[in-house]
Image (cartoon, rainbow, N blue to C red):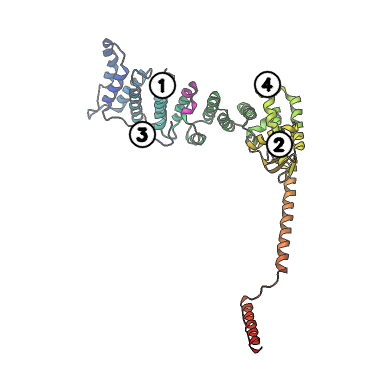
Amino acid sequence: MTSTADSTIVVAEGTFEEHVRELVNYLARGLAEDARPAYFRPFQESFEGTDAEGEIGNDRKRKSLILVLGAVKSLGEGTDREIDGFFNLLYYRVFSLFTDDVTQKAQLTPLIHTITNSPDHTAVKYRILANLFNALPRTSPLRLQVYNALLTVASSQDDVEVLSIRKSEVEQWLQEWEVPQHEKSVLLKRISEAFAKSNQLTKSYEYLQLYTKSLPLSSHEATSAALNTIALALRLPSILDFDSVFHLESIQSIKHHPLLSLVRTLVSGNFKDFKSWMSSHGDVLGHFKLEKAALEHKMRLLALAGLGTHHVGSLVPYATIASALHIDVKDVETWVIDGMRANLIGGKLSQTSQTLHVTRATYQAFKPTDWKYLQERLIGWKTDLLGVLDVVTAARQTKPAPHNHKNRAANGGASIEADQAAAVAA
C-alpha cells in the first residue's frame, strides 16, 4: 500500500480561493440551510485583504487553510471517491504553504489523528493515509507518524497484511527517517505486536529481534526484550536455529538467566541435560508460556541433529538413536523423518539392518569436541587422497612405453612381402 518512491499529489486546476471554497462546501454537507451562512462567514472573511498585485498573500492563505484544517472533525459525508478527493486537495494545499517539517507536523498531526479515529470507511482510511505517506519526502519524520496511524488502523481490524509490510523496506525507512532512535524502536515493537495479534508469530519474531537489537544495551527494555525474543523462539515449532539469538548483544545482560541456559541445553543436543534443567527450572515454563511437550519435541529433533553430525557417512543403529532421543526403537523412523522434514539431517533408513546411513547433518553449535571431530575427518580425507595419489603415480611409472603405430604398419608390410616371395619360390 505504501510506495518505496516519493509521489506527487495531483489535483484539479484552480485558485487558492476556489480550492478553499470546494473544501468548505464539502465540510458543510449535512448542515441545515439556515446554518450555512454563519458557517461560511469565517472562511470568507479570511480572504479579505490582498497584496499590491491583488492576490491573497501567503500569510492570509495559511490562516485560511488553518481554519479549514480545524474544521475537519471526521471523514465527512461523501462517497469514497469524494473523501479521497477532499483529502488529496487538502494535502496539496498544506504542502504548498507549509514547506518545512516542523510546520507540516503542526498542521497534519491533528488531521492524522482525526482520520485514524474516524469510524467506518476502513478501506478509505488506508488509502488516504497511504497517499499522505507516499507524498511526504522519504526523510520526513512525519512519515513515521503516518505509518503508526496505518498500523493502528490495520491492527484494529486484525488486518496487518493489508499494509504489505516488508522487512527490507522497514529497515530502509528507519535509516532514512530523521527521528529519535527510541521512536524507531517503538515502531518495530508495534509491528511485532500487530503480527502477534493476527497470529503470525514467525513474522512477529523477526520484528521482535529487530526491536531487541535497536534498544540501548544498558536499558531495562533491552533485557526484557531479549527474554521475550528467546521465549518466542522456544515457543515457535519452526525455530530450530538459535544462532541469531546468541548474536543479540543484549544477551550478555541475561547470560545467567535460566531461559538462556535452556537454549544452550537444547543446542547441545543432550537430553539428559534437558531433563536436569526441567527438574531445576520447571517453574520458568509458566512464566514465559512455554509447554513441556513442545520443548521435548524440539529437544529430540536437535538431539538427532547433534547425533548425526558425529556420524556423517556412517551407519547409526536404531538403538543408538533411541537412546540419544529417549524414545522407543519402534519410534525411531518417525523421528528421523521429522528431522529430515525440518532439514536437520539427511540419510537413508534401512528397516532390514535397523540402521540410518547419515549423509548430512546440521550443526547447532560448534564445540571443542566438534572441532576435534572435524579435524580427524579432514586428516582422514587427506590420508585417503594421498593414497589415491600414490596409486596414480605408481601406475604411471609402471606403464609400458607405447609402440610406434607407423613402425608397426611398416614392419607388418615387410613381413607380408617376404611371405609372398617365399611362396613364389616354392
Residue 186 vertical position relative to residue 377 in the rendered view, above or below: above
Which residue carries the number 1 mark? 115
* Left/right of residue 56 with respect to residue 335 in the rendered view: left
* Left/right of residue 52 with respect to residue 419 in the rendered view: left
- Which amino acid does the dot numbered 1 rest on? Ile
| Quadrant, the C terminus | bottom right
Mark linked to residue 304: 2
Q: Marks 1 and 4: which is nearer the front?
A: 4
Give the x, y percent position of residue 67.
33, 20
Q: Marks 2 and 3: which is nearer the front?
A: 2
Whole-angstrom CA distance, mark 4 to mark 2, is: 27 Å
First-in-chain label (1 vs 4)? 1
Q: Secondary structure at mark 1?
A: helix
* Count of numbered circles in the view: 4
- Which amino acid does the dot numbered 2 rest on? Leu
Which residue carries the number 3 mark? 8
| Quadrant, the N terminus | top left
Q: Residues within 10 Å of mark 3 (few under 14, many from 20)?
A: few
Residues drawn in magenta: 152-162
Give the x, y percent position of residue 196.
56, 25
- Which amino acid does the dot numbered 4 rest on? Gly
Residue 159 falls within the magenta-colored stretch: yes
Give the x, y percent position of residue 275.
75, 28
Evaluate whether residue 154 shows in this view: yes
* Left/right of residue 218 with respect to residue 134 in the rendered view: right
Q: Secondary structure at mark 2?
A: helix
First-in-chain label (4 vs 2)? 4
> Is 159 in front, or is 147?
159
